Image (tube, helix red, strand yellow):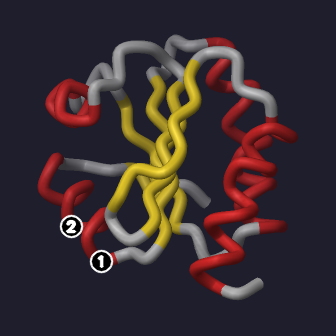
C-alpha cells in the first residue's frame, strides 16, 4: 500500500499535489519500523482512505531526511494541503496517531 518514494522531487511534488500525505520514514534495518509499518498501513486504509501513504527510506534518500529534518526512525510526517501537521518519532502509538489525524482529516474531507 505504501508507495516508495524514489527522489526528493517526487516527494515534493506529492506534498504539493495531494490534499493529504503521510510520509513513513524508515530504514530496512529498523526492527521497530517493520512492526509499526503494517499497523500504520491498516490505520490509513481503514480509517483515513483519502491520505496518500508513502515510504521514504532514510538510508537511500538522505536528502529528503535533511529537508524534512528527520533524524530518527521511524518518523511519521502527515501533511495536509502541503503543510506539515503531525510529526511522530520513535515510540509511536497507533491510537495516539489516530486521534492526531482525525481532527484535521475531518476538517478537510468532512468525513
Percent coordinates x, y for residue 64 in the rendering: 22, 36
**Relative horizontal placement of residue 46, taking residue 78 as reference (left or right):** right
SS for callout 2: helix
Which picture quadrant has residue 12?
A: bottom left
Residue 70: numbered disc: none
Point 30% across, 67% down: residue: 14
Point 40% across, 50% down: residue: 84
Point 74% across, 66% down: residue: 45
> What is the crowding at mark 1: few (fewer than 14 residues within 10 Å), some, or many (at least 20)?
few
**Relative horizontal placement of residue 42, taking residue 91 as reference (left or right):** right
Above or below, 22 against 28 in this view is: below
Point 35% across, 15% down: residue: 71
The residue at which mark 2 appears reads as 13
Task: Kindly indicate whether the residue at mark 2 contacts the one at mark 1 (C-beta within 8 angstroms).
Answer: yes
The residue at which mark 1 appears reads as 17
Percent coordinates x, y for residue 8 in the rendering: 16, 47
Which picture quadrant has residue 1?
A: bottom right
Amino acid at each position: 500500500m505504501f508507495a516508495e518514494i524514489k527522489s526528493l522531487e517526487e516527494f515534493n511534488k506529492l506534498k504539493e499535489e495531494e490534499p493529504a500525505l503521510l510520509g513513513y520514514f524508515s530504514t530496512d534495518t529498523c526492527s521497530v519500523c517493520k512492526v509499526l509499518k503494517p499497523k500504520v498501513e491498516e490505520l490509513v486504509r481503514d480509517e483515513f482512505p483519502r491520505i496518500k501513504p508513502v515510504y521514504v527510506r532514510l538510508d537511500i534518500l538522505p536528502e529528503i531526511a535533511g529537508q524534512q529534518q528527520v533524524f530518527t526512525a521511524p518518523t511519521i510526517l502527515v501533511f495536509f494541503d502541503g503543510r506539515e501537521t503531525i510529526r511522530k518519532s520513535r515510540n509511536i502509538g497507533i491510537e495516539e496517531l489516530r486521534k492526531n489525524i482525525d481532527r484535521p482529516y475531518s476538517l478537510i474531507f468532512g468525513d
